[in-house]
Image: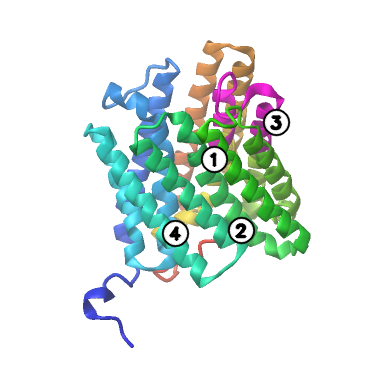
Amino acid sequence: MKAPIRHRWLQGPVPPPYRIPLLVLGFMALVIGVGAGLRRLGVDAPLPSPGLIALHGPLMVSGFFGTLISLERAVALGARWTYGGPVFAALGAATLVGGTPVWTGALLLALGSAFLVAGSLAVFLRQRAVFTATLLAGAASWLIGNLAWLAGLPFTAVVPWWAGFLVLTIAGERLELSRFLAPPAAAQRAFVGIVAMLLGGLALLAAGIDPRGFVASGALLALTLWLARYDIARRTVRETGLTRFIAVALLSGYVWLGAAAAIALAGGGLFVAPAYDATLHAVFLGFVFSMVFGHAPIILPAVTHFAVRFHRAFYLHLALLHVSLIVRLGADLAGSADWRAIGGALNAVALLAFILNTASGIWRGRLKISTPASAPNHGARA
């Protein structure tokens, strides 16, 4: 039985040209978010408004990552209604940059995350599996974090959920590909236990019951070890070209996730002083952006239908990211504000190199790829 005509327009895929503006707004949030972060470190960076300095986190997590992840999920699902996620997330970022009251941007971002939860629930109901449940938990974490921010709660109650959003999203997607290594049933049960421990730990951290975040840190360390053991990247790193680059990016990202957990467990605490900057950026920059760098040559063609031609220069922005984080975390541990600012500036250079290298890759592979309008399954990764 066909759907009523008034509902059919919600079902079909959105053509790539209509997705690109959302991608542009997401990268706008990235650029301005980076500028805001530099200003927080005392580095003179141009910003449309000084008020954006306080919005560094929301722009980076919800404006950039939220828009891109929800856009990728919408493309994978191929249903127009799921584009509410990236549309509201992109509009939320735009309103924050435009200087409207912060609550309007926070509300739009919360709506975007609600659509991602709905889309992730649709995926789970279509395919009931541990990895789809993990993706759903990640989307729910983003919604909880955005609602906490909208409610005016302090960032100590918001950041753990935003971290859960990104960590669980990545873990769920990597779990799907781990099936090629056929992890034993005990390993899969261990993964479920780790995710449950992480969610519980994040809740305890956000509520102030475990103010140092030791439970969540233990879960992050366990997740790092699990991914390092069962991720297919352990095999694909022996390949060549783009496949090897992706594997190197993933495996190096796991090092930063483990580093954040180790620093926290050693007494620094997770996302709290005195290791706030170190643990926060080890996760959000070291771990998450390593995943972004590795997956961008696959995600961007799926979303835009423009090929990204791999070049060995891609290793430059990956190496810059790691070197800059070593400088920044070293400065954090040494208590040097000046070197922390230098590390932050180098972080920005690494992200700029990523954007330029990716744009160059698109230019070199500027012939459109011949894939259907509905992109491959969201878990399709090299």
The residue labelled by disc 2 is 382
Q: Amino acid at mark 4?
A: Arg
Residue mark closest to the camera, 4 vs 1: 1
Q: Secondary structure at mark 3?
A: helix
Q: Is residue 249 left or right of residue 72?
A: right
Q: Which residue lies at the image location 59% right of the left edge and 12% below the top edge?
A: 335
Q: Which residues are magenta?
A: 255-284
Residue picked out by circle 3 = 262
Mark 3 touches mark 2? (CB < 8 Å): no
Dot 3 crowding, Cα within 10 Å, few <14, some 14–19, many 20+:
some
Residues at marks 3 and 2, CA–CA distance in whole angstroms: 29 Å
Decide which of tag 3 and tag 4 comes sooner along the chain. 4
Tag 4's secondary structure?
helix
Label 2 Cα neighbours within 10 Å, binned few <14 / some 14-19 / many ≥20 = some
Amino acid type assigned to the residue bearing label 3 in the image: Ala
Residue occupying the point 74% across, 62% down: 181
Q: State which tag comes first along the sequence, 1 or 3.
A: 1
